[in-house]
Image (spheres, grey):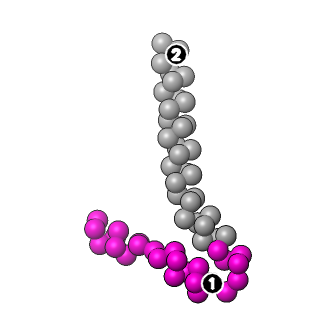
């Protein structure tokens, strides 16, 4: 597991420094935020489902 974490480590500053244009920076930003947004949506969906289920009982 630790090996996978080390292999997936990304240096965003270096990617932006070597970027061909400013549009690449936006893509890197969106790509780094997307996993957190997806996790937040999943967490809210589970919360909403459980809240609705408890109110039904």
Residue 40: percent from the left, percent from the top?
A: 53, 46
- Span of residues in magenta: 1-25
Would you place residue 19 above or below residue 35 in this image?
below
Dot placed on the residue nearer the N-terminal end, 1 or 2: 1
Residue to which mark 1 is pinned: 19
Residue 57 tag number: none
Residue to which mark 2 is pinned: 55
Label count reads 2
Q: Is residue 23 magenta?
A: yes
Instruction: Farthest residue to the top: give it.
Output: 57
**23 and 54: which one is in front?**
23
Which residue occupies 50% across, 35% down?
A: 46
Q: What SS does tag 2 mark?
A: helix
Which residue occupies 60% across, 71% down?
A: 28
Residue 37: percent from the left, percent from the top?
A: 56, 52
Residue 46 relative to residue 6: left or right: right
Q: Is residue 14 magenta?
A: yes
């Amino acid at each position: 597991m630790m090996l996978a974490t080390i292999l997936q480590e990304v240096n965003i500053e270096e990617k932006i420094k070597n970027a061909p244009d400013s549009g690449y920076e936006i893509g890197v930003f969106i790509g780094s935020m997307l996993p957190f947004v997806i996790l937040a949506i999943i967490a809210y969906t589970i919360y909403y489902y459980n809240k609705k289920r408890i109110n039904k009982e």
